[in-house]
Image: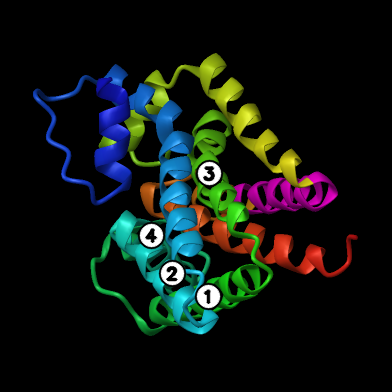
Amino acid sequence: MTPFLIALQFLTTFPIQLKSMPTKQQNAQSLLFYPFIGLLIGGILFAIAFSLQALPIILLSSIVLVVWIWLTGGLHLDGLADTADAWVGGFGDRERTLTIMKDPACGPIGVLSLIINCVLKWSAIYVLLSQKQYIALLIFPIFGRLVPLFLFLTTQYVREKGLGSSIAKYIPKKMATAVLIIGLSCGIYFLWQGIITIIIMCVVMLFLRHKFIQRIGGVTGDTIGAAIEIIETTSLLSFIILGFYII
């Protein structure tokens, strides 16, 4: 259970205490449980939306979004802000981009990226709840947490030290690939709406991977966090927009 508890401790605000320092192999194995943590987060969001559906939709949408952010401690939003600041302030230079990304301060571009992301996500949640598609809340946190699996399997981790470098070295590739495929297949439940959402998600992941390699030669923890947020939001938006065109 240690890899699962590592994933739960890292990805959520649940008060998890590990009995001992995890090994590098256990840290890498924890990646396999990321989609399960996504399912747990999605399950909580679904339970809240379903049990409080008598509330005005605008209020319920705000509650769902705030709980979503609170459950993750804003971890991935921090990565999005740092990545946005670095991408704009780095002026195309690899070393400058990596240096800015390590700066804990959040610049105006980082703040703007957070506002845009949260507004888009809130709007999509509002439409989703107005259509009473509460069950769909389960899949988007799963999709977001498939991103680290994809990036660690296919992309070089550029920082030589830290948690990410050991994960990249010891990740169980066959199991991670299987979990990635199973996680993506969850969208099939929603038929063509879900299938096309999966395709769009994969295209966006490939695009982000291309941009990360182009700028810094791979990924960092911040870029992975940014990718999680971007995938959650774009897959949620795609699902909602497709719902108006697919009968």
22 horizontally vs 80: left or right: left
Q: Mark 4 points at which residue?
A: 79
How packed is label 4: few (under 14 Cα within 10 Å), some, or many (20 or more)? many
Whether the residues at callouts 4 and 2 have beta carbons within 8 Å, the answer is no
Q: Which comes sooner in the sequence, label 4 or label 3?
A: 4
Q: Is mark 2 on a helix, strand or loop?
A: helix
Q: Give the range drawn in magenta.
A: 191-209
Could you give the CA–CA distance between mark 4 and mark 2, rounded to whole angstroms? 18 Å
Q: Which of marks 4 and 3 is in front?
A: 3
Could you give the CA–CA distance between mark 4 and mark 1, rounded to whole angstroms? 19 Å
Of residues 201 and 14, the one nearer the viewer is 14
Q: In which quarter of the image is the N terminus?
A: top left
Outermost residue, left side: 19
Q: Mark 2 points at which residue?
A: 65
Q: Which label was assigned to residue 25?
A: none
**Residue at x-position 26% and y-position 30%:** 5
- Amino acid under label 2? Leu
Q: Mark 1 points at which residue?
A: 122
Q: Which label was assigned to residue 142?
A: 3
Q: In the displayed structure, would residue 20 be above or below residue 156?
A: above
Whether the residues at callouts 4 and 3 have beta carbons within 8 Å, the answer is no
Residue 137 highlighted magenta (yes or no): no
**Residue at x-position 26% and y-position 65%:** 103
**Residue at x-position 45% and y-position 57%:** 45
Q: Which comes sooner in the sequence, label 1 or label 2?
A: 2
- Amino acid under label 1? Trp
Quadrant in the picture for residue 62: bottom left
- Amino acid under label 3? Ile
Q: Which comes sooner in the sequence, label 2 or label 3?
A: 2
Provide residue 22's location: percent of width, then percent of height: 19, 23
